[in-house]
């Protein structure tokens, strides 16, 4: 159940959980119909997040065109019955009154929030596509958009997708470690903001261990899986800026080839997590990270492909005594060839020199986009804490070499911080 918060005005809509997620939950109802029109879930998520980001910057009463025929008009009015001021933006907007939320998707008669305002449509010439307003207390959703409107909105706004950026030859700077920084006491939302301010445009959600099989192993409440994944995506989306969000999926702890888990159990578990990340929270791509077991990974990839988003797949590798890149399950060359259907492939949770070795060996072997996310060196255990030796300056030097060897996406894994990403950004843009 979506949690509704008692926060007045648009600020609550943008910064808090309930309404942003509910809007994506509404949109998921129309994904199949939109696909028939050539519109993907990634394009929907990009468009809605772009509109919400622009709404957050507007002053009440100002009408701004953000795309041909697409206007944002934030209305502020006084509700005499409830005795409060409200902000509304029809079509994509919301009024939060007390603990109840309203999507305004038309001009309902008698609604005191918009009554008497002469110009209350978000997109004037698309007004016929709106349906009447719906009220949904406590997260009970009633659908309030038409497919024709959503498709037309995506086509007009034309926000570049992650794949658009990659296909035009742009290098994507990702963020650094999430888990190791959260364990040091940093708040997730603050961490996302710091990475964005450091130059990252692709944020990893704090959902690496949030699949039901891993939660079962750790004796956590599996019923909290969807809610936790949803909240972590919202933490990444609440930053003061616009970026791409990738839903992070880590490996489940059981080995399929050793019959510790069944294929059906893996599919069921990851469908629960993916449904929360994609259909409810609206991530822009799916990141399957720190993979090692190719058999289980194949099942996860096939499950993720059904959600029609770009997939980023990375394996944890190291160099063997005879100078080969290997995982715990064998030679990486044998594994790499099993995932030619994944658009973005790479390595993470490895040493920087192993990441560079991957780029040198595979750049000319594939047309896939290549991604590297090394750790900040080999950790040293000091007391009860892992200390990573690689400095921000050394990580910047790694980033320059990674670009030279053909990396399309560069980020950091365990031990990397916003300072590492800032140093890489400055080096790559100097």
Image (cartoon, rainbow, N blue to C red):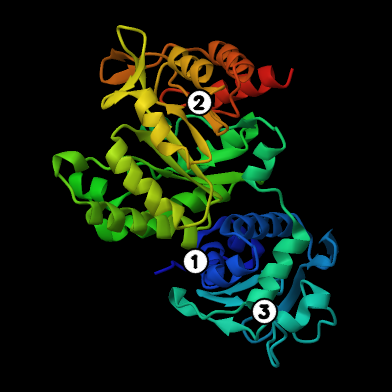
Q: How many labels sit on residues? A: 3
SS state under label 1: loop
**Whole-percent x, y for residue 120 in the image:** 79, 78
In the image, residue 63 sits, relative to residue 186, either above or below, namely below
Real-space Cα separation, disc 3 to disc 1, in angstroms: 21 Å
- Residue at the spot 35% in from the left edge and 47% down from the top edge: 300
Foreground residue among 85 and 111: 111
In the image, residue 293 sits, relative to residue 275, either above or below, namely above
Real-space Cα separation, disc 2 to disc 1, in angstroms: 39 Å
Q: Disc 2 marks which residue?
A: 372
Q: Earlier in the sequence, mark 2 or mark 1?
A: 1
Foreground residue among 33 and 410: 33
Tell us which disc is closer to us: 2 or 3: 2
In the image, residue 15 sits, relative to residue 149, either above or below, namely above
Q: Local crowd at mark 2 within 10 Å, few (<14), some, or many (≥20)?
A: many
- Residue at the spot 43% in from the left edge and 15% down from the top edge: 354
Q: Local crowd at mark 1 within 10 Å, few (<14), some, or many (≥20)?
A: some
Q: Are marks 2 and 3 in contact (CB under 8 Å)?
A: no
In this picture, residue 262 sits left or right of residue 188? left
Q: Earlier in the sequence, mark 3 or mark 1?
A: 1
**Whole-percent x, y for residue 414 in the image:** 41, 25
In this picture, residue 117 sits left or right of residue 21? right
Q: Disc 3 marks which residue?
A: 105
Q: Please give the label number shown on residue 5.
A: 1
- Residue at the spot 42% in from the left edge and 11% down from the top edge: 389
Q: Please give the label number shown on residue 401.
A: none
Where, quadrant-wise, is the N terminus in this rendering?
A: bottom left
Q: Does the image show residue 163?
A: yes
């Amino acid at each position: 159940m979506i949690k509704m918060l008692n926060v007045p005005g648009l600020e609550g809509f943008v910064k808090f959980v309930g309404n942003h997620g509910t809007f994506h939950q509404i949109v998921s109802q129309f994904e199949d119909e939109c696909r028939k029109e050539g519109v993907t879930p990634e394009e929907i998520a990009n468009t809605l997040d772009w509109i919400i980001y622009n709404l957050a910057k507007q002053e009440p009463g100002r009408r701004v065109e953000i795309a041909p025929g697409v206007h944002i008009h934030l209305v502020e009015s006084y509700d005499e019955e409830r005795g409060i001021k409200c902000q509304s933006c029809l079509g994509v907007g919301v009024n939060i009154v007390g603990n109840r939320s309203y999507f305004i998707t038309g001009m309902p008669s008698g609604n005191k929030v918009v009554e008497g305002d002469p110009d209350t449509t978000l997109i004037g010439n698309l007004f016929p596509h709106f349906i009447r307003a719906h009220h949904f207390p406590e997260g009970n959703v009633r659908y309030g958009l038409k497919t024709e409107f959503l498709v037309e909105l995506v086509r007009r706004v034309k926000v570049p997708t992650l794949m658009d950026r990659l296909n035009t030859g742009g290098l994507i700077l990702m963020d650094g470690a999430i888990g190791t920084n959260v364990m040091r006491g940093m708040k997730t939302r603050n961490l996302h903001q710091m990475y964005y301010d450091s130059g990252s445009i692709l944020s990893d959600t704090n959902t690496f261990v949030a699949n039901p099989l891993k939660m079962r192993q750790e004796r956590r409440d599996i019923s909290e899986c969807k809610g936790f994944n949803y909240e972590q995506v919202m933490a990444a989306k609440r930053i003061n800026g616009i970026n791409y969000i990738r839903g992070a999926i880590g490996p489940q702890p059981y080995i399929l080839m050793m019959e510790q888990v069944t294929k059906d159990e893996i599919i069921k578990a990851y469908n629960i997590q993916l449904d929360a990340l994609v259909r409810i929270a609206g991530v822009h791509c799916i990141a399957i990270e720190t993979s090692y077991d190719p058999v289980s990974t194949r099942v996860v990839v096939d499950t993720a492909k059904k959600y029609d988003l770009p997939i980023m797949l990375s394996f944890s590798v190291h160099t063997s005594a005879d100078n080969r890149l290997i995982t715990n399950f064998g030679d990486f060359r044998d594994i790499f060839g099993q995932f030619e259907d994944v658009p973005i492939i790479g390595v993470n949770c490895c040493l920087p020199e192993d990441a560079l070795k991957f780029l040198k060996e595979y750049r000319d072997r594939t047309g896939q986009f290549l991604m590297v996310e090394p750790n900040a060196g080999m950790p040293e255990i000091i007391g009860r804490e892992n200390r990573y030796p690689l400095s921000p300056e050394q990580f910047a030097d790694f980033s320059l070499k990674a670009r030279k060897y053909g990396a399309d996406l560069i980020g950091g894994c365990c031990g990397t911080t916003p300072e590492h990403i800032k140093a890489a950004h400055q080096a790559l843009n100097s």
